[in-house]
Amino acid sequence: MTSIRRKGHLAVAGVLLASVLAACGDDSSSSSSEAPATSGAAITLAVNPWTGSAVNAYVAKAVIEANLGSPVEIIDIDENATWVGLDDGSIDAVLEVWPSGHAADYETYITGKKSVLDLGKLGPAAKIGWYVPKFIVDAHPELATWEGFKDPELAKLFATAESGDLGQFTMGDPSYVTYDEQIIANLGLPLRYVVAGTEAALLTAIDTSIADQKPVLMQFWKPHWKQLEVELVEVKLPDITPECEASLAAADGAYACDYPIDELYKAASAGLEAKNAAAFAMLSKMTLTTEQQSEIAGYVDRDGLTAEAAAEKWVDANPDIWKAWLA
């Protein structure tokens, strides 16, 4: 979620549709003073509410508009509602799917209806998990695993006004797919699940925790640029078992294991290739490494650029990377 994160029962976030026309610039690395060699129908890319998803889409937009001559619209949408849009063709592609939260969608739309296509791996291997700043584990090594949180006194180190006598477990955006509330209940931990509201709130909580040396426990993920700047320790949760896998498939609320490693992938509406073959081919070839995505996301969350400006900065500086997507 540079962004983990990511569940069908959650409410659909509000939809913001922004149509942006193709632009030409003077820097030949990201655009050209000449007209693009090809042009095609406008396409729509989904952005889910975490920074990695946004920078992926805006990098694709910058490359497509400058080099393929196709306008790209960006729609901000909940990750679950994205699949409905891909299915009916109102959304052409999404460039970061976390498979651990969307096995049922894959089966329904890609394997079953074939209304959505798997466009291949994005590149990063991602991991959602429970994280604490390293100073906490240095002081209390037992909190490196979930079993340490069974101790009410240790769990109470994370208590807040909102959690009372229980330790607080902090979640980011409520639209993310999450099993944390289930994990807490099913492991019988003295923790209260509290939704902070945004990825930005999680970043603030990390900074405040480190500055004040006050414990915080939260859902976070890799890749994320913040992981390159501060020392966070992932709390060891129970290994994934066949029973937990069955629980996920049944959505029965009995999940009590760790999150799996997610090989992030891209997905497109089945009609995209006929609609705009050049854009379809480019998106199929588009890949970013963990380091590349973290770099671009850092321009947003650390440096204060918009996702669009961050993407353009990276595209300007890295023509050798994105030109391979057009070959």
Image (cartoon, rainbow, N blue to C red):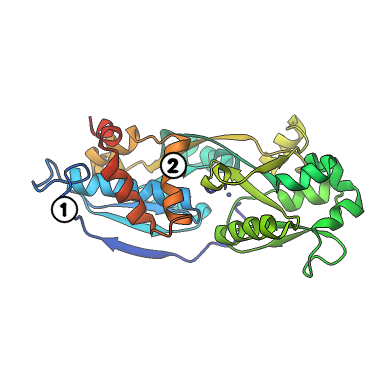
In percent of the image, x 86 and y 43: which residue is there? 148
- Left or right, residue 162 beside residue 173: right
Q: Position of residue 317 (x, y in %)?
A: 28, 42
Say the numbered circle drawn on residue 280: none
Residue carrying label 2: 293
As drawn, 239 above or below 68: above
Closer to the chain start, of discs 1 and 2, is 1
Residue 114 can be seen, yes or no: no
Q: Position of residue 245 (x, y in %)?
A: 70, 35
Residues at marks 1 and 2, CA–CA distance in whole angstroms: 24 Å
In percent of the image, x 19 and y 43: which residue is there? 67
- Left or right, residue 80 beside residue 285: right
Q: Nearer the viewer, residue 28 or 208?
A: 208
Q: Residues within 10 Å of mark 1 (few under 14, many from 20)?
A: some
- Left or right, residue 173 beside residue 160: left
Q: Position of residue 289 (x, y in %)?
A: 44, 34
As drawn, 206 above or below 163: above
**The C terminus lies in which quarter of the figure?**
top left
In percent of the image, x 14 and y 51: which residue is there? 26
- The amino acid marked with disc number 2 is Gln
Q: Nearer the viewer, residue 203 or 163?
A: 203
Q: Quadrant of residue 285?
A: top left
Q: How many marks?
A: 2
In percent of the image, x 43 and y 56: which residue is there? 303
As drawn, 207 above or below 254: below
Q: Residue furthest left?
A: 34
Q: Are marks 1 and 2 in contact (CB under 8 Å)?
A: no
Residue carrying label 1: 24
Q: Residue furthest bottom?
A: 161
Circle 2 SS class: helix
Circle 1 SS class: loop
Q: Position of residue 84 (x, y in %)?
A: 46, 53
